[in-house]
Every structure is written in C-alpha cells, then in structure tokens.
Amino acid sequence: MSVAVAAQPVAPHLQSAGPSTKTSRVTGEILTSGQHEPNHDDIIPYAQFPKEVTGRTVWTKDDFADTSIWKHRWTPEQIQELEEAYDRFAETGLPLTAVNRETFPFSKNITDFLLKLRDFIVDGPGFTLIQGLPVNEWSVPKSSAIYLAIGSVIGVPVSQNHKGHVLGHVKDLGNDPTQIDKVRIYTTTARQFFHTDNADIVGLLCLHRAKEGGESDVVSAQHVWNTLQRERPDVAELLSQPIWYFDRKGEVSEGQKPWIQKSVFYWHDGKLLSVYDPYYVKSIQRFIDAGLIPGHSEAQKEAIQVLEDTALRLSLHMVLEVGDIQFVADTHVFHSRTAYIDHLPPTPRRHLMRLWLATPESEGGWKRPFPDSAHPRRGGIQVNDQPATCPLDAE
C-alpha cells in the first residue's frame, strides 16, 4: 500500500531550486537529483592521493569493542516525546510524504540528541545504532512517520528507486538474486557484499528479524584504503581511476545512458570518499555483449575480490534487534549483510524500513566531485519526474 502524494507544506530549505534542479509539479518540492557521473575535471589522480588517511573517520573494529561508544538507547522520556510529536503531526492530516523538520518538529531534547549523533555519522566514524523504539506497540503508519521524522533531522530523505520510494522496505519479494541485471538485492534473501548506497547516509529500522542470518557488518572505507595502500597499492590505484562501469539496472530517465562510469575512491576537498556496489559493477555483461562498453579487465575483477576480502577481514559485526535503528555514512563506510533464512507464515518475515538521506553542503555535508554536490536532495535514484512516495510495505 502506498501513501498518495498530495499538496503539502514545503520545508524552507527545499523551497528554492537552482538551475540544475527539478521541482515536483504536485508538491512544489525539489525532486531527488539522482545518479550522476563525476565531474572529470574534479578527479584527482592517484599520485596525489594520501598514502594514509587519518582522523575521526578512520577506525578499526578494536576501537569500538566498547559498544557504548556507538550504541544508544531511547529513554522513556524520549519515547514519550516522540509519541507526542507524532500525535501533533497526525492531527494535521498530512500524508507521510509531508514529513519534514517543520511539519514534524521534535523537542529540543530529541533534536539535540539526534544532532549529536549526526556529527558522529557525518564527520566521525560514520555509524551508530539507536535501540529500543517500541515498534511492536505502534502501528506501521506511526512507526513510519516517527522514523521519517528522525531521519529528517539527520538528513534529507531522497528517492531510492524508480518508484520514488523515500520510505523503502528491505524485504524478500521472492526475486531471483542471480538475475543481478534486473533485481535489486535488498528484495531477496541473498548476501549483500560490502557496498555504499547512492546517498550520504543510509538508515535501517528493524520491524521483524529473520529466522536466521540477515546480520550487518560495517567497516571504515578509509581504513580499508590505508590497508590497500600498504598491502596492494596496485589495487588502490585501480580503484581510484574512473574506469568502472556501474549498471543503472533499468532505472533510467529519458536521455540517460543505462550505465555510469566512475571511480570507487575519490580524493576531494581534503577528504577520501567512496562510492561502490559490486552488484552494479558485475551486472553489465549485456552491455559488453552489445559492444557498448569494454567491460572490466582481469586486474579490475581481482581488485573487486581484494576489496571485498579486505573489508570483511577488517569489519565490525552487529545485529539489529526489533526496534533498532542503524545509520551508516555512505561517504566513508562500507556496509554489508549476511544471507538469511526467513520465517514461514504466520510468523512475520524479516522486514526493515530504509531511508536514504542527503546531507547537503549547505548543512555541512561533504563536498562531492559530482555535478549535484550542491543539490539539497543530492544522490538517490530519480527517474524522470516521478514524485516521492511512502509505501507502507514492500512493493
């Protein structure tokens, strides 16, 4: 079931569009920017990359053996404040697509808590877990609205697919994971290898756990880079070059190519950024067969495996329980998911709500070597003028 898009208040920070932005003819809000190739003039050659990156964004799993550094739990007072904010929003009659900081304001207590976590995510280690949201006691619309409002403090929700889903659902739809040129892996039970999403931050809220598996791993992409620089500088160099073809998997606007060519690692504005998903790299064979692109060399194929093996070796493992929210910075953290076995009816199947969030430059987000870097809803997946939607279940 999808929540219809209706005319609604527009957040002030999304009201004025620059020359490269498109606005919804229905709501007046700025649409998600979508996928772009990098500005080639902004690509720094490998020789100018640092041999070692340092700072808050670089970490090892041993640094977080004390889980209190990255795990937090809602207090009873905060839960009450979340519910009171929801009640005020529900009284307006606005749809889920209208949730933003102005239509769904939180108390200073909640906002300050989330902004502190935002700093830890955006300019720090890049991941956190907030436990204890009582989703078993709430309706799906209530959980959805509160989750969207929480995400709207951390960043700006963007569309995750050609259907305009700003509220996504990670759930097995029975799709064949071997059909990687057609299927998004989050709609299957298959393992997800280390990757980033096309956003600045990804959020997951666990509604139901799997019977077995479906657990999460995160790793500092910058620690992976440092390790590659020591152990396999040849791989690091390949990953820094804009020679990688990424499949759009058919989520293409009019006039766009069905693939994107870009790098995996970028050195930009004094920061090391990463953009990567192996499924999108591996699913391009049909374009190679058609003679449209050259494909990837044997050295590149080896580099993919070395990157995965290194990330797995260095990663931190975590389990999301029901009511847990995980936020991960796609700018400088790789994340993955183990394969899982789901429950049989009538037990609810594994189900996570997902947000992709932009952190605009105007709000302290990292500058990116892409043409939409200054866009308030940068990244995401936008197909033509598809407006934002908020389905209440996977579809």
Image: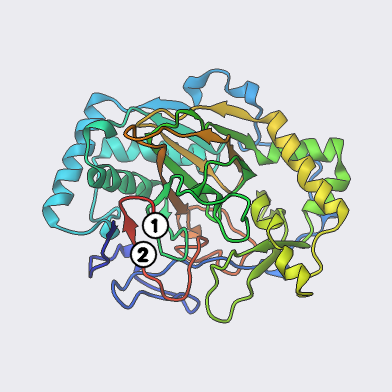
Query: What is the C-alpha distance between the residues marked 2 and 1?
Result: 6 Å
User: Measuring 70% from the left and 56% from the top, which residue is drawn there?
Assistant: 281
Q: Residue furthest front?
A: 345
Residue 64 lies left or right of residue 359; in this view the side is right
Residue 297 position within the rendered picture, expressed as x and y whole percent measured from the top left: 85, 58
Which residue, given by chain and number where applicable, does mark 1 sit on? 166
User: Is residue 238 something one can see in this rendering?
Assistant: yes
Q: Amino acid at mark 2?
A: Ala
**Label 1: which secondary element:** loop
Q: Amino acid at mark 1?
A: Val
Front residue of 1 and 23: 1
The quarter of the picture where residue 305 lies is top right
The quarter of the picture where residue 241 lies is bottom right
Is 336 located above or below residue 165 in the figure? above
Front residue of 242 and 154: 242
Q: Residue furthest left?
A: 91
User: Is residue 53 something one can see in this rendering?
Assistant: no
Which quadrant, please, contains the C terminus? bottom left
User: Measuring 32% from the left and 55% from the top, which residue is drawn there?
Assistant: 391
Which residue, given by chain and number where applicable, does mark 2 sit on? 388
Report crowding for label 1: few under 14, some 14 to 19, many 20 or more residues within 10 A (C-alpha): many
The quarter of the picture where residue 259 lies is bottom right
